[in-house]
């Protein structure tokens, strides 16, 4: 009878020399292109680390991709992948380490990066994205021991779309003849008036809607919405240029004010723009996308199966630069990182 072997637990891996690596950055801060990003890397070690490489990187890039059917003279059973990419910024700072070793405990490294002045805004959709992040890492003997990544919100700038006196004030009107009650006819006109149509992110947009109802029917609802239209530029595997346009509703306001027959009603509306928006045009987007905005007013007429619509072009320009950097959070406060890799 053979000798019975003893059962030993599997060997435990050695404890990592790096306990944690953290990034200290202002939480939810929006950085204007051309401003400064300041922060700290906090590296905590379980034991002494010899010949460490501690660095921090600023990375910004964009990517678009979509599928589309081939042309009429080609095989419709195949989809073509169209894509494009752009690199906006990649800066690295390697921290000096005295005597090439770090003792157990916490070590704090200060850093700052200057964002380039020509950058697109942070953006994300199912077709494309523009993203920026700060990444801190610690290496030892050519192996990555710890890594931490934190994404940034960056507001792009523009200098090609500046407000001009010709934009003040602005009035757009549409009129439609409608039929109802078999033989009855009338007209409905819709007008939107604005003091200007050029805005910066976060600004208040005010508009006056006027409806002239020359029918015997009551109008119940007027809708004003802000739309963003993004045109993506991509290339097929054969380097053929392709364009794709996606539209989305960014803001919406409904006025449920009954408009009596043969009456004219004015409605004043307003909403605040998001704090982060792509600027109008696309010179800042590295050629992968362009963005345009429209304010659309709509009166639906269910009793005539039609509607009246007016469209006002809206221009989003750069945000005013009132500060060149963001302050650090209070000591000891570590904002949550969207992604952590160890």
Image (tube, rainbow, N blue to C red):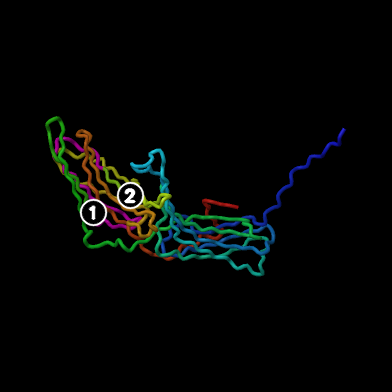
Residue 110, position in %: x, y? 55, 65
Q: Is residue 13 above or below residue 77?
A: below
What is the number of callouts on the image? 2
Outermost residue toward the top? 182
- Secondary element at image label 1: strand
| 109 displayed left or right of 261 | right
The residues tagged by marks 2 and 1 sit, at their Cα atoms, a distance apart of: 21 Å
Using the rendered image of the protein, determine whether residue 265 is visible from the camera's viewpoint: no
Crowding at mark 2 (Cα within 10 Å: few <14, some 14-19, many 20+): some
In the rendering, which numbered label is found on residue 194? 1
The picture places residue 165, in percent across and down from the top left corner, at 22, 62
Q: Earlier in the sequence, mark 2 or mark 1?
A: 1
Query: Where, quadrant-wise, is the N terminus in this rendering?
Result: top right
The kind of secondary structure element at disc 2 is: strand
The crowding category of the residue bearing disc 1, from other C-alpha atoms within 10 Å (few below 14, some 14 to 19, many at least 20), is: some
Looking at the rendered structure, which numbered label has been put on residue 229? Answer: 2
Judged from this view, the residue extending furthest toward the bottom is 99
* Residue 245 at least partly seen: yes
- Checking the image for residue 95, the label placed there is none
Tell me if residue 201 is in the magenta stretch.
yes
Pinpoint residue 174: horizontal percent, then vertical percent.
18, 46
Picture residue at 15% right of the left edge, 30% below the top = 181
Residues shaded magenta: 195-222
Answer whether residue 242 is magenta in the image: no
Report the residue that reaches farthest toward the right: 1
User: Looking at this view, is 278 or 188 the one in front?
Assistant: 278
Note whether 184 is above or below 43 in the view shown.
Answer: above
Residue 106 image position (x, y, % from top left): 63, 61
């Amino acid at each position: 009878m053979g000798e019975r072997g003893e059962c030993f637990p599997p060997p435990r891996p050695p404890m990592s020399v790096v306990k944690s690596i953290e990034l200290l950055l202002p939480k939810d801060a929006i950085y204007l292109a051309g401003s400064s990003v300041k922060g700290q890397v906090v590296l905590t070690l379980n034991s002494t680390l010899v010949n460490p490489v501690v660095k921090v990187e600023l990375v910004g890039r964009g990517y678009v991709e979509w599928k589309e059917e081939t042309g009429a003279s080609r095989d419709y059973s195949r989809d073509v992948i169209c894509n494009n990419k752009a690199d906006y910024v990649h800066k690295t700072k390697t921290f000096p380490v005295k005597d090439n070793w770090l003792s157990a405990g916490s070590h704090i490294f200060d850093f700052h990066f200057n964002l380039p002045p020509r950058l697109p805004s942070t953006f994300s959709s199912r077709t494309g994205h523009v993203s920026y992040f700060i990444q801190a890492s610690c290496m030892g003997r050519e192996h990555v021991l710890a890594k931490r990544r934190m994404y940034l919100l960056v507001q792009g700038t523009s200098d090609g779309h500046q407000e001009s006196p010709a934009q003040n004030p602005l009035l757009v009107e549409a009129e439609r003849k409608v039929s109802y009650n078999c033989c009855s006819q009338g007209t409905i006109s819709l007008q939107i008036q604005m003091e200007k149509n050029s805005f910066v992110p976060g600004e208040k947009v005010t508009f006056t809607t006027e409806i002239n109802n020359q029918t015997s029917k009551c109008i119940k609802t007027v809708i004003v919405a802000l739309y963003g239209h993004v045109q993506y530029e991509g290339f097929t595997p054969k380097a053929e240029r392709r364009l794709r346009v996606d539209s989305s509703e960014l803001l919406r306001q409904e006025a449920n004010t009954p408009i009596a027959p043969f009456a004219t009603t004015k409605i004043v509306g307003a909403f605040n723009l998001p704090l982060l928006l792509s600027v109008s045009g696309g010179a800042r987007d590295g050629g992968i996308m362009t963005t345009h905005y429209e304010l659309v007013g709509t009166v639906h007429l269910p009793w005539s199966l039609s509607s009246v619509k007016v469209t006002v072009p809206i221009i989003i320009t750069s945000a005013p630069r009132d500060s060149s950097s963001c302050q650090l959070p209070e000591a000891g406060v570590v904002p949550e990182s969207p992604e952590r890799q160890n």
